[in-house]
Image: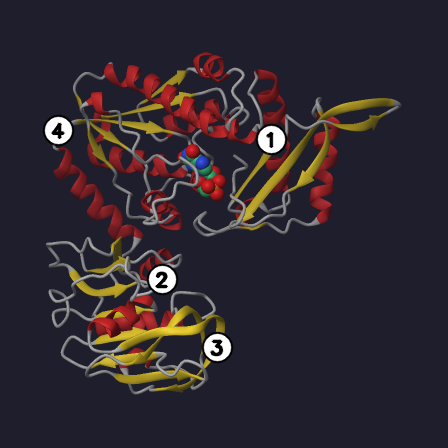
Amino acid sequence: MQKIIILDFGSQTTQLIGRRVRELNTFCEILPYNKYPEDDKDVIGVILSGSPLSVYQDDAFHVDLSHIRGRLPILGICYGAQLMSYMYGGKVESAGTREYGRQNLQFVDTENPLFNGFEAHSQVWMSHGDSITKLPEGAVRIASTETVENAAYYIPGEQPVFGTQFHPEVFHSLQGTLLLKNFVVDICGSKQEWSAEAFVETTVKELREQLGSDRVILGLSGGVDSSVVAVLLHRAIGDRLTCIFVDHGMLRKNEFHDVMRDYEGLGLKVIGVDASEKFLSDLAGVKEPEQKRKIIGRDFVEVFNAEAKKITDAKWLAQGTIYPDRIESLNITGKVIKSHHNVGGLPKEMHLQLCEPIKWLFKDEVRRVGRSLGMPEHLISRHPFPGPGLAVRILGDITREKIRILQEADAIYIQNLREAGLYDEIWQAGAILLSEVRSVGVMGDERTYENPIALRAVTSSDAMTADFAHIPYEVLAKISNEIINKVKGVNRVCYDISSKPPSTIEWE
Ligand code: XMP
């Protein structure tokens, strides 16, 4: 399948470039800047991302493009454009102050294929501390703003090179999608074949070839990612797929039973394991978030392993890893913010090979694939839920009583969001029990001294960034009333109004 390669120099917006290219129904892969594939027969063009670095600093990321230039069209964005300038006889200098935000083009060459269809003063979005003060050899200027003379350049050739100082992938570059379409479709020649249906067809075929007559084990979580993998694999290899669904005791109210029923309805072979005793006794008294995650991760591997070993002839372990999991884990700055996601959890002693059929998909694409596989809508549109479950939504140590309180409050919250028609507009919602905090209240004539519940709901497109959902006050008031009246142990409800970044979606 045709694809665009995006070389990642560490920008916050690299993933957005990927999303925009996929929205053009074109497959793309984001790779670290120095990991261009040896076999590039399907590659039709290359995009160089932005970066927090300066091209002239000592530890800047540099890359040899000689094997790409002249063979494929290249588009450099921000740092990518500066890098090619720096390498090909131009000059990059500090702009003095960082330019950040919207600007309008003062000059744009609409005869150039990159700007085909552009308006004269199109708004673009800048975020840079360096400027291209001299264009690379053979380049012509094709756009300027009032303060950025070389806002875009073009090096003609059979396989041309383009550079833009602004970020077309960002929403505030109002014709950015048009620019990317001009590059991907008109200049690189994408046939725009990437679709959920095409993905299902090719993936099922590839899985059959890859797995032959082998047996596969898959860990199910109840979430959309692992469920879609299950249905894809089931379509490819039928009953040679065995799924394992571990109940660690910190799922939502009734979730274990509901999800088991859904899976059985899909014809999947699922082993449900109630391991809540083990998890809860190992977690007893543990308060520190990372320690909780580590214990849950370790116990999960142990329980899963014990079940998986019973399937003696299995050769593969399938996982519902998706693209953003890998990008967050691959963060090239090397800083771990939370140890999460299903990446890197394959126990070595299992001697199984890893099968990750949706590892290139974004969440919305996983949902499109799920729909094209005919899965029930409530499974597909289900909010994401963290692997460690309610453990990371109970601040402090975990007890059965706290889990019960949180499950009740969470169920009331989610049910109300559904009734208000808000559930599907929200990326993810959940209640958090602030079990280390107590406050005074009054119920009837009685003083209460109990825990608050925080409600979290965010809008997002991929969980990398998120805004708190603007739930109407009337709905919040109803939820708050209902929780305080019905859930014993809670006498106060707060709504979390923080965005990501700087906050994260989960509280721990
Ligand atoms: P944060 O809290 O980092 O969460 O903003 C981003 C997304 O990841 C989910 N999340 C997890 N998912 N295992 C998972 O499978 C985990 O340990 C984990 N921690 C956070 C979170 O619910 C949100 O969708």
- Left or right? Give the position of 348 relative to 172: left
Q: CA distance from mark 4 to mark 2?
A: 38 Å
Amino acid bearing label 4: Ser
Whole-angstrom CA distance, mark 4 to mark 1, is 43 Å
Q: Residue at x 23, y 30 (%)?
A: 238
Question: Which quadrant of the render holds ligand 1?
Answer: top left
> Amino acid under label 1?
Ala
Q: Nearer the viewer, residue 26 or 76?
A: 76
Measure the C-alpha gap from mark 3 to mark 2.
Answer: 21 Å
Which residue in the protein does label 4 denote?
Answer: 213
Foreground: disc 4 or disc 3: 3
Q: Judging from the image, what secondary structure is the residue with disc 3 in? A: strand
Mark in front: 1 vs 3: 3
Dot 3 amino acid type: Gln
Task: Identify the secondary structure beneath mark 1.
Answer: helix
| Residue on which disc 2 sits | 20
Q: Image quadrant for the N terminus?
A: bottom left
Q: Which residue is mark 3?
A: 103
**Placement of 193 over or under 207, stated as above or below:** below
What kind of element bears circle 4? Answer: loop
Provide residue 443's location: percent of width, then percent of height. Answer: 83, 26
Mark 1–mark 2 Cα distance, whole angstroms, equals 36 Å
> Mark 4 or 2, which is nearer the eye?
2
**Tag 1 residue:** 411
First in sequence: mark 4 vs mark 1? 4
Q: Earlier in the sequence, mark 1 or mark 2?
A: 2
To which quarter of the image does residue 68 belong? Answer: bottom left
- First reached walking from the N terminus: tag 3 or tag 2: 2
